Amino acid sequence: MPSILPERSIMKEVAIDWARKKSENGAWFDGKKSHTGYPMVKAGLKIFTENMPKEQAYEYIKAGSEVWCCNTDHVKKLKIKKGITLPKSKKNPQHDIDAQVLFELAQADKEVTDHKKKKFRQYNLEQPLFDYYTTFKSIQKMKNATKNRIRYRIHPDINKVFGNIEESEKQIVKILKKELEKYPIYTEWMVHIKGISVVTGSGVISLIRDAHRFATVSKMWKYFGLDVQNGKAPCLRKGQKSSFSTKGRAFFNGVIADCFIKQRTPKYRDLYDRYKARKLEEGFTLGHAENMARRVISKEFLKDAWIQWRKVSPPVVDEFVVLSMEEMVHKSDADLLIEADLLIEAV
């Protein structure tokens, strides 16, 4: 079987410990010697770091380098293990020591075969579609707030500005439509679903990013808070960090479900009606039955998206997920459908 891995050129490996304060100089280590400051922004570097600012990481990536990040705790634990307990100070911020520890940690990480246990993850640029979509949502929010504020007032100058905001919103929609042409999941599947517009389609893709990053349907459900825990939907608890994407769950249970219900989308609206009626017969309140039915059609849509994504788009394979992706790529459509149906949990 031919390898599905892309050919990679040999890259120079370096570790960078970035200085949080402008008054300090960071340090980088190339495997032989420590250097003060940072390496020149250029192609061909494979950078291991723990705290590089996003904007600087983007500069290296755009130039043709790779940036791999790990959690600060990993560096701290290795320093303790090696007996490096000297406290940091203004005179000795230890950037050179941290850079060396980072490099050693990265070399050890290469020997780890289980991608789930790897400490470093590659830093990737955001999809342009994600930036366009978030920009649209910001403009839309500003437009709605302005509209409510001037609804019953006559302010010619403000009305002119409001017209400019509406025009900007229309321009962003055109940009979104053009960008969506690059995504087969939209052009070959989503565009044919009644109720999915340019904006909602952009939202779906921006939130999922790449369905191949979810090995199973249930993992995608869990990411968006649509799984079942002890017979109930997961909820937010005071003092605890959320275990799912709150924005994602609100989007799929709210926006997407609304579109399918109001537009009477075939399959999803039918499923909604049948499930809601069944729950009402079982004695659930109208509100509970409504929320449960919305969850069902959200999960069904995500299941379909997970399957279709594998049919129309090749996986973005990296060195972490070669085995699992290789297995997934060679599954037939029938296998995917059977697997997805088996993964449907009690809703």
Image (spheres, rainbow, N blue to C red):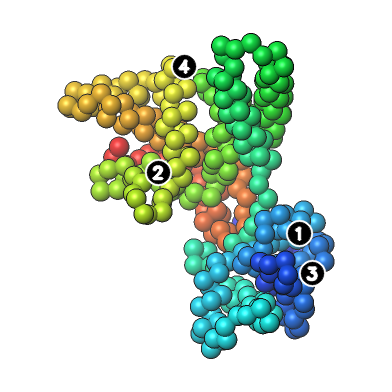
Where the N terminus falls, by quadrant? bottom right
Task: Give whichever of 296, 10 is nearer the camera.
Answer: 296
* Residue ID for mark 2: 225
Q: Which residue is mark 1?
A: 60
| Rendering coords of residue 313 (x, y %) | 61, 40
Q: Mark 2: which amino acid?
A: Gly
Q: Earlier in the sequence, mark 1 or mark 4?
A: 1
Q: Nearer the viewer, mark 1 or mark 4?
A: 1
Q: CA distance from mark 2 to mark 1?
A: 34 Å
Query: Badge 3 local density, few (<14 within 10 Å), some, or many (20+)?
Result: some
- Residue contact between numbered discs 3 and 2, judged by CB atoms under 8 Å: no
SS type, badge 3: loop
Residue kind at label 3, given as amino acid type: Pro
Sequence-first tag of 2 and 1: 1
Q: Tell me the tag on residue 39.
A: 3
* Disc 4 residue type (three-letter): Gln
Q: Secondary structure at mark 2?
A: loop
Q: Residue at x 66, y 39 (%)?
A: 131
Residue wearing tag 4: 263
Camera sees residue 72? yes
Is the residue marked by circle 4 packed among few (<14), some (14-19), or many (20+) residues within 10 Å? Answer: few
Residue drawn 67% across the image and 82% down it: 92
- CA gap between label 1 and label 4 equals 45 Å
For marks 1 and 3, the one nearer the N-term is: 3
Q: Is residue 222 left or right of residue 274?
A: right
